[in-house]
Each structure stands twice: as structure tokens, then as C-alpha cells.
Image: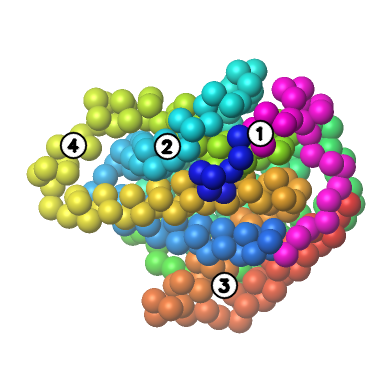
Amino acid sequence: MSSSTPAPALTAAPASPTVAGPPPHQPTTLMAWVLLVVLAAIWGTSFILMKKGLLVFSAVELGATRVTVAALLLLPFALQHVRRVERSRFKWLLLSGVVGTLIPAFLFAYAETKLASGLAGVLNALTVAFTLLVGALLFGQRITWLRAVGIAAGLLGTVVLMGLGGSGGEATPTGQGNAWYGLYIVLATLGYGVSINIIKHHFHGIPSVAVTGLLLMLIGGPAALYLLLGTDFLYKLQHVPGAWTAFGYIALLATLSTAVAMVLFNKLIQQSTALFASSNTYLVPIMALIWGRLDGEVINGWHLLGMGIILLSVFIINRAK
């Protein structure tokens, strides 16, 4: 995942999606499990960072800033690899970037203007279900009974974790009465499911830093133009107290949760199955609760039970062939 990745790796796989696809089944490696836990730890903090950024900036400003900063961070890698990827694949990069990064960045920001961050983290787990459904509908994957059991266990765990145990964190003043804002996150997780399957089936064998950098390069330009010309972002930085602090939270969000995490996530997709990669979203609420506990929040018995069920679901999904 570094800039020293040899160039032939980008051209080794032909443009045909059929040939470039992953092997039918591959065992999950220790590295894949490590990446899964690291990603959950990173994304478990993203909801808090979004809340901090929304104290000053609007949802559209947060979403555009997040994408712009992440694109700038990985621009050197994108420029290094731009000539080494077949042009026929750029349409898939653009589609993945729009539905799996750009639109969700705005949808999550909109949702968190009303929803508690803990609830947002739980709804994020729907990514696993949509990854499976999109894979079955558009990419010919089978929905086996064991996968269905794993999905059901994961959803049950989220219900126990957040429905019976509470959100695990403080909601906004109107958060508890605006649950319908969760529809924004439902749409975002649908986009994640589409993007995960595109990367798995069209970019197998290409270094993850190249996929992520090029994807962000394609959507980063429009996001930056909109941020600078269509919002009050610059005015707030100059005149609103606390704006630079809020920007710092968003920059940290973009660096860890978007740029770094996307590289790691695309690497995870390539080293495991698309469904296993998306199962990290079951661990995100657990990590969010752990960070909250370190900050003085309470973890009750229902939280612990929900964590156990969710971890079991990840194991079941991983065992599905």
C-alpha cells in the first residue's frame, strides 16, 4: 500500500471483468482480520468527529470538505498510477466514487444533524445486508442459508445493542424524535454495497492505494469547486469562532476515516470476500461504545450481549462459503 508498489501490478489483470474477478473462494487470512479490527477502530470514531464538525459547518460543507481533503491527501498516488490503469475501468472508478464515497459523505452528514451518533453507527451495519443483496442481484452471487443466518444475527445484535441497551452516547436535543433521518444512512449503506461489489469484481489485483487515489481524484475536483464556490466554508473559517477547530475535526475525519481507511478497506476487499470486508460495520458500534466508555460513558449488560451476538455474526459470515 505504498508508493513503491511495482507498476506491473496495475497492468497484470486484463480489462475484462470476467478475467479480472476474484477466485471463487479464498480463506480469510490473519492480515484480513487485523485490517477488519483496525478499520472498525477508525470508523468507530468517525461519528463523533462528524458531530464535532457539524457544530460550525453545515452538512454539505462537512461532506464536501471531507471528500476534498481526502482527495488532496491521496492525489500523489493517483497521479503516479493514472496512466497505468486501462481507460475502460475509469467508468467503474467514477461510479464507485460517486455512490460509495461522495453521496454517502453528504447523506451521513445530513443524518447526523438530527440523529445520535451511536444510532448512526448502528444503521451503518446495514452495509453488510446491502453488499450481499447487490452481489446477488447484479453480480450473480448466491445467498446461502449460512450467510442469511449471519446477516440475521448481525441485525439482531444491533437491535440488542442499541434498541435495548440505548445509543451508547448522548443524542442531539432533537435526535431521539427524528429517527426517520436514518433513511439517509440507509441510502448511504446501499451505495456502500454497490461500491464494495464494484471494487471486488472490477479491480481485483490492483493495489488498493491506486484504486482509492484514482477514485478520490475523480470526485475530489467537483467537491472542492462546490466547497469553495457554492458554500460559506471560507467565510466561516475567517469569521466564525471555533471554525478552525471544527475544520480540524473534519480534516482528521477525512485523513483517517476516508483516505487511510479507504486504502485499508480496499485492501481488505482484495484479501477476503466482499461480504467479509463489509462485516466490519458490525464492529463499528462496538468500537464506538468502547471509545465512549473511555470518555466516561456507561456500557451496560445489553451492550455486552449485543457485542457478543455481533462478533458471532462476523464469525458465521466468514465461515460461509
Residue 234's mark? 4
What is the quadrant of residue 94 in the picture? top right
Residue closer to the observer: 12 or 138 = 12
Number of on-image labels: 4
Say whether residue 55 is visible.
no
* Residue to which mark 2 is pinned: 76
Residue type at numbered disc 1: Pro
Q: In the rendered view, would you say 37 is above or below 93?
A: below
Q: How far apart are the alpha carbons under marks 4 and 1?
A: 42 Å
Give the numbered dot on residue 165.
Answer: 3
Look at 65% across and 71% down and name the residue there.
Answer: 306
Q: Going 28% across and 54% down the picture, which residue do you hit?
A: 248
The mark nearer the N terminus, 3 or 1, is 1
- Depth check, mark 2 against mark 1: the one in front is 1
Mark seen at residue 8 = 1
User: Dot 4, crowdedness within 10 Å: few (<14), some or many (≥20)?
Assistant: few
Q: Is residue 243 magenta?
A: no
Task: Tell me the amino acid under the disc marked 2.
Answer: Pro
- The stretch of residues the image draws in magenta is 9-30
> In the rendered image, which quarter is residue 292 located in?
bottom left
